[in-house]
Image (spheres, rainbow, N blue to C red):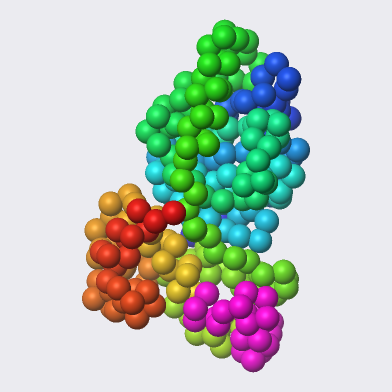
Amino acid sequence: MKRTLVPPIDPEAFAPTTERPLRGKLRILRQQAQIQPHRHDWAQLVFATEGAIHVQAGDSTYIVPPSRAVWVAPKVEHTTGAIEQAQLHTLYLAPSLLPEPEWQSCRVIEVSPLLRELALQLDHQPESAPEPQRERLLSELILNELRRSRALRLGVELPQDARLRRLCEAMLADPGLHASLEDWAASAGASPRTVSRLFRQQLGVSFAQWRSQVLLAHALSMAARKRPMKIIAAELGYASASAFTAMVTRTMGMPPSQFFARARTSS
């Protein structure tokens, strides 16, 4: 299914201010809709309460289910898309709220049930005037939960080379398409040898290794939403669950059940 670019909902209308340094926003993002790339001076936390999303920020792409969120550092260009229809929640935060070094780069964090509920309680209307004390208390609790959240080592790196980046973005958009290196290279207007060299130079891995990272990222997202193994395998282009299991075992040295369990508990 082809992605549809949609404009962001006026970020300036939700810009953090001295009086309201933490703002909330809500929108429905239809399946395969993708918000146009943009950037702003404040930080952003984005997660879905329904559906799975992918967030491209800087040189990485993150594929996250509702149990996780992506932290986008200030001034980093980013775009968010829906793998399936998603209820998208965004928190905008003044940079001064979290000045520590670990918050100056993009990453994935766990979304605790409390953090999710606090975010839902924020006012989501750009021109409304919520009760100041309530919003201040909600904001303080949200910041406390953010500082307590676990960072997760998730993300698929993207290259700088324009040809290779287009190829990688196409693979991310359709992970179930098991085309050969030769086919992908032809679509990018480059030779297989050039594509192989660019993968090694810019990403430090082979074409096959990077593709496995993409498949595993999508698989983790679906497993977090409790999709059956046979459904995960089918959506990722495998003829059977056993074929998918063989790929995970070969790549990670453990079966999918163990890999998914470790991913849930690792930081």
Per the rendered image, the range of residues in magenta is 186-210
Magenta stretch: includes residue 4: no
The quadrant of the image that shows the C terminus is: bottom left
| Residue 134 sits above or below residue 50 on the image | above
Observer-nearest of 36 and 1: 36
| Residue 154 sits above or below residue 26 on the image | below
Q: Residue at x 61, y 54 (%)?
A: 56
Percent of width and height locating residue 101: 66, 46
Observer-nearest of 181 and 142: 142
Percent of width and height locating residue 182: 56, 88
Q: Quadrant of residue 199?
A: bottom right
Q: Residue at x 28, y 55 (%)?
A: 227
**Farthest bottom residue?**
193
**Farthest front residue?**
100
Observer-nearest of 191 and 161: 161
Q: Quadrant of residue 97?
A: top right
Query: Does the magenta stretch mainly form a helix, a strand or a loop?
Result: helix
Percent of width and height locating residue 224: 34, 52
| Residue 111 sits above or below residue 170 on the image | above
Observer-nearest of 126 and 107: 107
Percent of width and height locating residue 122: 52, 21
Q: Quadrant of residue 266?
A: bottom left
